[in-house]
Image: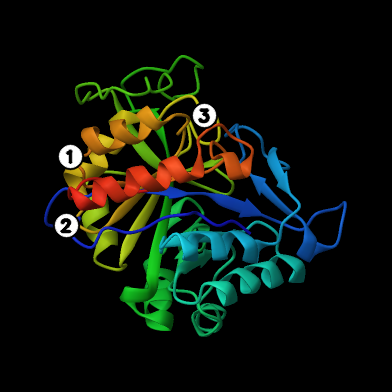
Amino acid sequence: MGEEMGERSEQRGAGPSATPTAALIVHRSPYSQPHHSSHFCTNTSPDAATTPITNFTAALPSSHYARLYKDAGLGGGHVIMLGADGASAAAAREALAAFPGGLQVGGGITPSTAPAWIDAGAAAVIVTSYVFVDGRLDEGRLEAMVGAVGRERLVLDLSCRKRQRQGAGAGAAGDGTASPPSPSSPSPPSPAWEYVVVADRWQTFTDTPVNAGTLGALGSACCELLVHGVDVEGMRLGVDADLVALLGAACPVPVTYAGGVAVMGDLETVASASGGRVDVTVGSALDIFGGDMAFEEVVAWSRRQQAGAGGRV
């Protein structure tokens, strides 16, 4: 299960307001009782098809972090269940109970299970691979999710990677993927590459590009988009400024970017590259999850941004 500390801008569609959010991903611990230990995990390689790499293991329960966000006035965090087991679900419910209406939940959510999570206190459900089947967006499944909880309670998670356009030549790895994005400074748009949604633990390229058309179509079916820059996810090497700029320019609904945040300057990069229109997650870089970024400093930055109608965490 994972929680992402964050607040959401209520005016992102109308003007600048980027916000940082913090990522907490947990699943059952093999070393202790499930409710006593949480693993904050990120798969740091899109080619790692097996077990995610554990960046940090906490001895505190999920409810501790939920209360931390609640006390800081940070709503809209993400609780992601990595394990398809009762322990992961129990940890998710524990977090939701500690901050009812303040967290979103994801991980194996389907139309049949989504309403129960709303009843358990989730502000919204986050849906990822369920709506993509055999590398294609399944509109029937998307409609079913909207029917189950309503557009206003649905967040669509789009994990994406940069890939060479067909006919534009092979990438550095010879597999069609583009060279890794240069962090912290957006480059001019290039016809040689595009961002494409990946599914199945980031192993499968779908036929869905991340562009204005896709963002507009999917935005009409949800209240928010959560977009992971897989090329930098979990690496703490800096954000994918090109992707952030694309989201800021083309997304018609509130959108949160995740991937690569390592230092406070990365928050400023997201705010500037998006024109203040994209929120950002902060996960393993936070000191409460074993990183170097002080939780209090990130919260203070977020509040300053809100006061100035800028980005938030």
Quadrant position of the N terminus in the picture: bottom right
Give the Cα distance between marks 1 and 2: 11 Å
Dot 1 or dot 2: first in sequence order is 2
Q: Secondary structure at mark 3?
A: loop
**Residue 61 at x, y percent in the picture:** 70, 61
Depicted 113 relative to depicted 279: above or below: below
Q: Is residue 196 left or right of residue 211?
A: right
Q: Which mark is drawn over residue 13?
A: 2
Q: Secondary structure at mark 1?
A: loop
Residue 234, picture quadrant: top right
Depicted 32 relative to depicted 227: above or below: below
Residue at 60% of width from left, 45% of height from top? 288
Q: Which mark is drawn over residue 236?
A: 3
**Residue 120 at x, y percent in the picture:** 56, 81
Give the Cα distance between marks 3 and 1: 22 Å
**Residue 202 at x, y percent in the picture:** 54, 42
Q: Is residue 276 left or right of residue 74?
A: left
Q: Amino acid at mark 3?
A: Arg
Q: Is residue 115 left or right of residue 34?
A: left
